[in-house]
Amino acid sequence: MKTIPQRTCIVCKQKGDKSNFVRIVKTPSGEIAIDKTGKLNGRGAYVCDNIECIKKVQKTHALNRAFKCEISDEVYQKLVEDYGKN
Ligand SMILES: [Zn+2]
């Protein structure tokens, strides 16, 4: 049987299949990108694809901790715009 790689949400620490998560990547050039294709190079952080966790990421600036650097508000805003609805 094939093992499915498990990801962990940086907000609620819930584990699951990567298809349940939004991937955010710090690219080798230091840029932060929301990885919609799942194919971007770089270090990734995962957040549940649900409104609670997406909003909490913005509220707690969880990406700053995950990537150990300052993340601009625009990134958080984009994340909420793209995934924080419904
Ligand atoms: Zn979560």
Image (cartoon, rainbow, N blue to C red):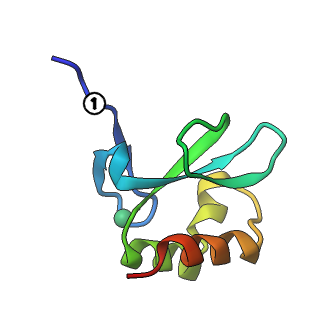
State the residue lying farthest toward the top.
Answer: 1
* Image side of residue 10 versus residue 4, left or right: right
> Is 48 above or below relative to 85?
above
The image quadrant where one finds the N terminus is top left
Answer left or right for 74 relative to 14.
right
Q: Seen in the image, is 75 located left or right of residue 15?
A: right
Residue at (77, 65) in percent of width and height = 70
Which amino acid does the dot numbered 1 rest on? Ile
Residue underneath mark 1: 4
**Picture coordinates of residue 6, whole percent (x, y):** 32, 39
Query: Residue sitting at 64 percent across and 38 percent down?
Result: 40
Q: Whole-percent x and y of residue 55?
A: 48, 80
Could you say which quadrant of the image residue 62 lies in?
bottom right
Q: In this view, does 10 lie above or below 62?
A: above
Total label count? 1
Query: Which quadrant of the frame does ligand 1 lie within?
Result: bottom left
Check disc 1 and report its element: helix, strand or loop.
loop
Residue found farthest to the right: 29
Residue 86, x across and y down, in percent: 37, 82
Q: Quadrant of residue 80?
A: bottom right
How many other residues sit within 10 Å of disc 1, few (<14), some (14-19) or many (≥20)? few
23 lies left or right of 8: right
Kindly identify the residue that appears in the image at 65 percent across and 78 percent down. Answer: 77
Residue 78: image location, x then y, percent:
65, 72
